Image: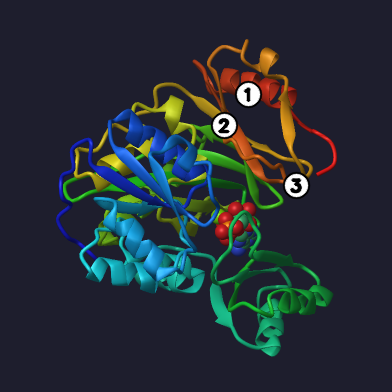
Amino acid sequence: MANKTIKQLTPPATIGIIGGGQLGKMMSHEAKKMGYDVVIYDPKENAIAAQVSNSQVVGGFSDEAKLLEFAKQVDVITYEFEHLDATVLENLENKGYPIYPSAATLRMIQDKDTQKKWLADINVPVPANFPVFTYEQLEDAFNRFNSKIVVKTRKEGYDGKGNIIVKDIQDVKYAYEQFADFDIMVEEFIDFSMEVSVMLVKNEHETVIYPTSYNNHEDSILIKSQVPAKVSDHVALQIRQISQKVLDELQDYGIFCIEFFVTKDQRVLVNEIAPRPHNSGHYTIEGCVCSQFEQIIRVITGLPLGSSELINPSVMYNLLGSDNGKYTVAGLDEVLKIPNCHFHLYGKDISGVQRKLGHLTVVANSLDQANTLADQAFDKIKFEIKGEQ
Ligand SMILES: Nc1ncnc2c1ncn2[C@@H]1O[C@H](COP(=O)(O)OP(=O)(O)O)[C@@H](O)[C@H]1O
Ligand SMILES: [Mg+2]
């Protein structure tokens, strides 16, 4: 994996971000705050990240010619999601365009099977897993893992969309058929006591680890993050050791998220790594000295990393759509009266069922207080659909 010197770029150099969604938008905000120019690459014209950037190149994620056109306009490239064409990015790197994290890291991470093998190779504990190629192998796995498995697409998964939990032999066939067009893998189902995550940052000279976030998911979509997570010393130690191990072994620079399962017997297993800012790190915008979005800009511009110190306990809620169509937001007048409640709306023009439309973060003197105020705020925000589309 690339382990090259990052060229220092001072403003107004131009940063290129592949992917024009909310993560790209929040990265762009930070880059613009620091005086950089930003070009977004996304297939959708007027992508929400482009609305706060200098310009956009419109093109498909595998369109090599368009991506080259984009690369020529920028001084350094990063990305907001991992489902990109690693070969196309590798070709750009070979032409001399710097990309962080590298295409090799992206290739390893974007396939959950190769990612899990990499983790196992560096002795990081993961749920038992293996790739499956036939229906018989899947049925075998179901029996072997005590009739509780998670079937995952090796690539393209997000917000639980590439996962099916199977606890009934009848559903083995369903899962196999649902993922007929994908390479798949199977994992033992972990009856975890909690899910937590950490953000890690690495450049040539230093590493930074953020506080641990306790994450609640509904239908495999993150709904709430509470920081700092209340975990035992034993669990905290395992999280620290695994995080350090991953940082040591990743021959690369960027920001990474590790999602963990904490088992009922207090073991810590890695669920997955993301090579980019992460939803469970949104609290860092108001909760930490330096946000996850500012960190990635610092990494790719060769500047010193910022502090990951938590200023105060923080609770973040995702704000998800419940219906399809154009929408308005109700409840803001109440929500913004809540002290230290920060409201983010991503500017997506169309709502969708469980689509991430925004988030809110409450920072308070105690986690209990942050929870109380965030719960109140979350209850008040409503997205109302503006009629037929
Ligand atoms: N092996 C497992 N056992 C139990 N739950 C799991 C397992 N794998 C995933 N999940 C649940 O599904 C969620 C999404 O799975 P994940 O593999 O992280 O996919 P995505 O790429 O969609 O985030 C996890 O956060 C967790 O709640
Ligand atoms: Mg995940």
Give percent across and percent down for residue 20.
49, 48
Amino acid tagged 2: Met
Residue identifier under label 1: 374
Choose top left, top right, bottom left or bottom right for residue 351. top right
Real-space CA distance between mark 1 and mark 2, rounded to the nearest whole angstrom: 7 Å
Where is mark 2, residue-wise?
Answer: 316
**In-front residue for pair 106/234:** 106
* N-terminal label among 3 and 1: 3
Q: Residue at x 70, y 66 (%)?
A: 164
Q: Is residue 119 visible?
A: no
Q: Position of residue 181 (x, y in %)?
A: 65, 79
Q: Position of residue 360 (x, y in %)?
A: 58, 28
Q: Secondary structure at mark 3?
A: loop
* Distance between mark 3 and mark 1 Cα atoms: 22 Å
10 Å crowding of disc 3: few (<14), some (14-19), many (20+): few
Compared across the picture, whether 377 is left or right of 240 comes to right
Q: Which callout, 3 or 2, points at the residue further toward the start of the chain?
A: 2
Horizontal side of residue 274 vs 142, given as left or right: left
